[in-house]
Amino acid sequence: MNDFSQQKQEYSQLIQQVLDEAKHQGATAAEAAVGIETGLSASVRLGDVETLEYNHDKGLSVTVFVGQSKGSASTSDFSRQAIVDTVRAACSIARYTAADEFAGLADKALMAWDYPDLDLYHPWQVSSEQAIDLALECEATARDFDKRIINSEGATVSSHSAFRVYGNSHGFIGGYPTSRHSLSCSVIGEDNKGMERDYWYTMARNAADMESAANVGRITAERTIARLNPRSLSTRQVPVVFSAEMATGFFGHFISAIRGGSLYRRTSFLLDSKGKQIFPSWLQLAEQPLLKGAIGSAPYDGDGVRTQERDLVIDGVLQGYVLDAYAARRLGMQTTANAGGVHNLSVHTSDFGRDELLRRMGTGLLVTELMGQGVNNVTGDYSRGAAGFWVENGEIQYPVSEITIASNVKQMMLGIQAIANDINPHRNIRTGSILIDKMTVAGA
Amino acid sequence: MMTDSLQLARSLILEPGGLTESALAQTLSMLMSHGGVDDADLYFQVSRYESWSLEDGRVKDGSYGIDQGVGVRAISGEKTGFAYSDEINLSALNEAANTVKAISRQGQAGKAKVFGKMHSGHHLYEALDPVASMSDQEKIHLMEKLDKAARAIDPRVTQVMISMVGVRDVMLVAGADGTLAADVRPLVRLSVSVVAEQNGRREQGSSGGGARVGFGYFLDDDRAMSYAREAVRQALVNLDAVDAPAGVMDVVLGPGWPGVLLHEAVGHGLEGDFNRKGSSAFSGRIGEKVASELCTVVDDGTLAQRRGSLNVDDEGTPTQCTTLIENGVLVGYIQDKHNARLMGMAPTGNGRRESYSHLPMPRMTNTYMLAGKHTPEEIIASIDRGLYAVNFGGGQVDITSGKFVFSASEAYLVEKGKIIAPVRGATLIGNGPEVMQRISMVGNNLQLDTGVGTCGKDGQSVPVGVGQPSMRVDQLTVGGTST
């Protein structure tokens, strides 16, 4: 199997060529990235192969700075001529863009001059036949689970490997391979009230860490059957539990509001929140970029800046923002090595599971699906379509759908009552299910 | 002009890699010679884009990119094999073709048909290159002018963000069914987003537009300025907005972009792949009444210069105007070749793909509802207590259960037929087939959107258009916070 050793040398030279060419064409600083991704994706449906896709993508991007002016360009062609043309395109743009005093590379001293191997590459020797067999097993388990499973959208096994090299005119150059494998399934159930669909998937850097095909199939079927014959809810205010998968998205809204771009554009509902109580006083959140083998791990960020572990929220108080070098300069702060996003955001949970969380809620709504884009990053207004289950005395009563849940993300953050320990470790945002004190449910 | 686009496609796609039509024919013949392969196609693409963005009153970011490649597809019954390469030459083409033949099975070998004369379908837009359609200096000047204009409208405007994107996409598709077609597709888009601030409260407003034209389009008819004015107007309206109501009520949808409701509630559910698989709430319902008799909905890929229009789709089929729902009765689906063949129907020119590295699927082009007879004023006046939703953010649909949702970015409370106050944070949720039955008034003011829509399906994005006249929907669930 490809260990990308050939690419490492070749791409490092390519980066150097690009940086040299940029300098030659008048750039005072530059950065470049080269990446390749290869993979296989096999989908089956109703017991037979549906698609077999072979992926092979490569690309090169360059950003040049001419003084304080910036330009970028990209190409999928790695020929000498294409590199010259691409750098020329970037430099040409930099001639027209306005000088920006905050533009430029991150500080040289912050580069990840040496970086650890984070164990992110586990190629999977899976042939297309084996991938198909695994997908077939997964789908068959789901379809055989219950006779109300009447149709299928299929199961897909995919395996991808990537290698990316980044370098800049500080002399920093880094590159490492990563892998990502997944198995997903989606089936349709039907009873006299109509059809419902649900899905489940498993994803990991190492195929050995994935859930078994039979498990994914069984969970897919259980989730689908559980949704059959949903009711709506009349309009009311109730406590709400977000399942772990939905809670991941909820913390995503929080992260999006403390990103540098949202802050300096003043398009965030969490402006000037550093040092303030934004979560309940028992809540702790850490960023762990250096976890071995994890989905969100990275030894350096998109600016080449060394990542490090940090506490993002201590006792409910925000300790810092999510900044790249540019946003940090604009805000008069230090970069937090988040060019490209957060790396393994980890929520400290309680020591009990979701069932106990539902008992603590007593009567309320368990949300397992959210629809639409009804989250306003400027005001924090939150109103989204939802589906899930009505819970009484800690016990699930019946499925609900065609309702909306609404509040404000700021209030929801402060209103978190508890977080269960049902974390899926193979996610970039690692949280269990969360209990929120009160939201408005609207329905018929 | 038509010969221009064919000539351009040949010179940009085939000639640099030394490919000829007979080489493409040989590759297709090789693919078809494998057992059980029913169909195959080669999709070539060379595209370039340019984007500029302004913030803090200055254009500080710009980027340029080129992408090219060829996607090879072989179909055997319901099975599809797919591979692609970012190099366009014979060895890359053959390597991809050798990979996809893994999909073949026991069965009779097929035969590739002889290519028809290469064609480029309709002539809905010029074969121009938006990137070269205006000088960089002029592009920057336009954006700076817009920024100043937006700020001058009202002192409460504190931030203006503008982006301008131009793409030229050149495609050529060769199919074992004898198809040989090419298209040069320009596309531009300008977006203006503003933040207004008043007494510590901040609200955002945004607007924009685009079409398959050059950048000069934004200077015509004061278009760019109208986007700036509209973005500021929306932000200022939202500064005074109160919490949206929660509960079931009658809703008036404004004309134009709110047609995204049709896109979500109806359009996706009528795509051929979902219906072939029986996974759509509309599956097997052709001939049934699925909407109120006031509703006639079409998907039209043939509107001149429209963002969702195409001279030919990505399988080389000329686009058409397909009636989906006629006076409330379901009459047609949106089809690509693969699903049309498996369902025994005709392709409708809706086979689309994000790029050479993605498989084509049945996708919408410009989807809209035809005008009815009521004036917009009559429709609002008919509401006792309800919501008037003028503009929307995005939407989403679960095609199996029919549930859809979308978020209003500008909406008003209506009481006794009068608009009372702007509301914020309203989300509408419903069940497509049910909601379509509850459309009780349709306006005489059909409008198409300004050319900003992008539709996502299975991780693939394609530009689309939506539109509708004003309409009244009885008893829709509005998800606000105010009970």
Image (spheres, coloured by chain):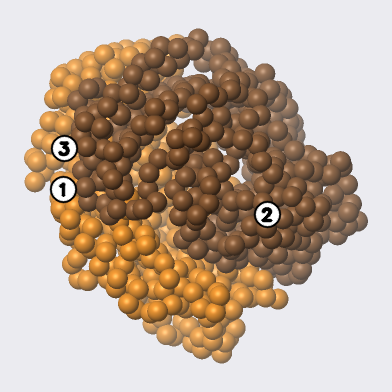
Considering only vertical position in the picture, is B120 above or below B469?
above
Q: Which chain carries label 2?
A: A
Considering only vertical position in the picture, is B5 above or below A208?
below
Q: Which chain carries label 3?
A: B
Q: How far apart are marks 2 and 1 (CA)?
A: 48 Å
Name the residue type under label 1: Ala
Tell me: B405 left or right of B37.
right
Instruction: Pick whichever, A379 or A88, lies toward us.
Output: A88
Foreground mark, 2 or 3, reads 2
Q: Mark 1 lies on which chain?
A: B
Tell me: A253 left or right of A10.
right
Name the residue type under label 2: Leu
Instruction: Pick whichever, B108 or B320, lies toward us.
Output: B320
Residue A419 in sight from this viewpoint: yes
Q: Dividing the picture into quarters, in which one does residue A12 lie?
A: top left
Foreground mark, 3 or 1, reads 1
Instruction: Pick whichever, A92 or A186, lies toward us.
Output: A92
Chain B tint in image: orange
- Tags 2 and 1 both on a single chain: no
Q: Residue at x 19, y 25 (%)?
A: A81
Residue B123 in sight from this viewpoint: no
In the figure, the brown chain has which letter? A
* Residue holding disc 2: A318
* Residue holding disc 3: B119
Q: Which mark is residue B132?
A: 1
- Tags 3 and 1 both on a single chain: yes
Q: Residue B21 carries which label?
A: none
Instruction: Pick whichever, B418 or B85, lies toward us.
Output: B85
